[in-house]
Amino acid sequence: MSMKIRNYVGGGWRDSSATETLSVTNPATGAEIGRVPLSTSRDVDAAVQAARAAYPAWRSTPAPQRARVLFRLKALLEEHKEELARQLTTEHGKVVAETRGEVQRGIENVEHACGIPTLMMGDTLEEIAPGIDSASWRQPLGVFGIITPYNFPVMIPLWFWPYAVATGNTVVLKPSEQDPLTHQRIIDLAEEAGLPAGVLNVVHGGQETVESLCDHPDVVGISFVGSSRVAEIVYRRAAASGKRVQSLGGAKNHMIVLPDADMDLAHEACHASIFGSSGQRCLAGSVIVGVGDAHGAIRERMLDSAASIRLGDGLAADTDMGPVISAEHRDRVNAYITQGVADGAKLSLDGRGPKVAGFDGGYWVGPTIFEDVAPDISIGTEEIFGPVATINRADDVDGAIRMMHGSRYGNACSIFTTSGKAAREFRYQAGISMIGVNIGVAAPMAFFPFGGSKQSFFGDLKAQGKDGVSFFTDQRVVISRW
Ligand code: NAD
């Protein structure tokens, strides 16, 4: 059944004024499950006006009461966790164990934002001069726009909007047009939890919708997550109209394995990092660098385990890896593989064109491994965002770090070693924001900042945690003499 997707404005589901719609499909079958409108600037304005109207009353709702709405939402999300996870698999494709993990990571952000009365406290100091005291107050700013990608459509909106509303702002969310259905259910749960009309609004669409949000004079800030190309465009465009912006982009993550590593642990972590979610994670490992003798050991294990991955419907218990998001994305990943071969890289496992019995319409790419990839060809430099690994060799750890520094991205990296000194040196030298030591997916939990460096991040304050609270508030300093 194909669902007509509506915008959520001022506490109700409303038809978009869009004349164009896009198909939302189940990536395992290719069947249409919804049609999403490409909303216009008129729709964006209606949502912003609803958010603006709701702001004064929501801002003056005491922080503990705002937190209680989130407490109720957390309980509802837990109650509906399995339903949300299964629905998410049908529109994203990843296996249900992964969608359960995603919903859990989203819940943890709601849980953390429940602490807003403490998180939002300011600072005080008496006697800054004779008889004079000073205090800072964190205050909300108004209407925020939040724009999110397809790869974590439940969790990534929850990196932002719980903090935005907990701090007393109101929100217009623009979810990914590729898999917008599961978050619709979360909006219903937020309404059930008692979030007042207009505090959270949703406008579906693509480029024009995003541009309208970036340009809108009544939007005070933008949180964006997506590819680096669009992250930079959004960063520049929203900043040009005077907004504060946090804009998270793409990645090409290196995993360095030293000869003294626990090789089984390193292999398990690299395998899960590279092939989990079919490689569609900003924290996915992409380039394994085996140092010295570690190269042969990790290479052999990776080639064995990758070849045994079972592709299939993410809802089936025996599936290891689901499809990628769309036919277009499958073709893009395949084109990178073809280009890698043309550029002279050694293709040791070819994932192009696999067949999955009973799922002929699905968007399948099998596990793929390249070796000896030159640092300047597209497969070595660009984000593929599919189940494609590169295994390279370095003579020593400095050579491995140099390889990593050659990337224009700086999202995540990992080192596998039993040497504390080597791990410490790696942390010191990496210049990358999310670092795993014997960890394959270095995902900061809700109370730590999430975001990268270099071309992986544009801005200052990152997602989640204290950074999230700072991004959605301004510190107002009062100096008093009585
Ligand atoms: P995308 O950049 O194509 O889309 C992201 C959002 O931007 C969507 O809502 C989309 O509608 C909108 N958009 C697309 N093109 C636009 C344009 N030209 N102008 C304005 N808006 C536009 O990204 P995606 O394919 O949905 O998601 C995958 C990307 O997101 C990967 O690059 C991945 O690394 C990145 N990502 C990064 C993080 C992080 O924490 N840094 C987390 C998740 C995903």
Image (cartoon, grey):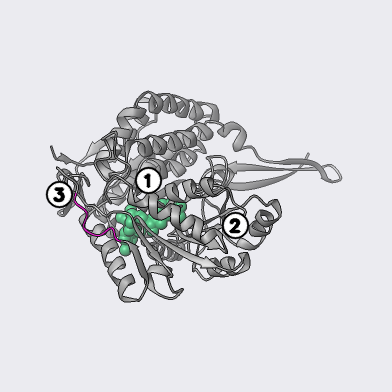
Which residue in the rendered view is the most extreme toward the right?
130
Q: Position of residue 47 (x, y in %)?
A: 32, 45
Residue 238 locus on image (x, y percent): 42, 61
C-alpha distance separating marks 2 and 3: 44 Å
Q: Is residue 366 magenta?
A: no
The residue identified by callout 2 is 259
Please tell me in which quadrant of the rendered image residue 189 appears.
Answer: top left
Whether the residue carrying mark 1 lies under 8 Å from ligand 1 is answered with yes
Determine if residue 110 is in view.
Answer: yes
Query: Callout 2: few (<14), some (14-19), or many (20+) C-alpha neighbours within 10 Å?
Result: many
Q: Main secondary structure of the magenta part?
A: loop
Kindly report the distance in space between the C-alpha atoms of the residues bearing marks 1 and 3: 23 Å
Judging by the rendered image, the residue that carries numbered circle 1 is 152
Location of the C terminus by quadrant is top right
Q: Alpha carbon of mark 1 to alpha carbon of mark 2: how far? A: 34 Å
Residue 91's spot in the image, x, y percent? 25, 42
Secondary structure found at label 2:
loop
Say which label, 1 or 2, has the lower sequence index.
1
Mark 1 touching mark 3, by CB under 8 A? no
Number of callouts? 3
- Answer few, some or many: residues within 10 Å of disc 1's Cα (few below 14, many 20 plus, some between 14 and 19): many
Element at label 3: loop
Residue 361's label in the rendered image is: 3
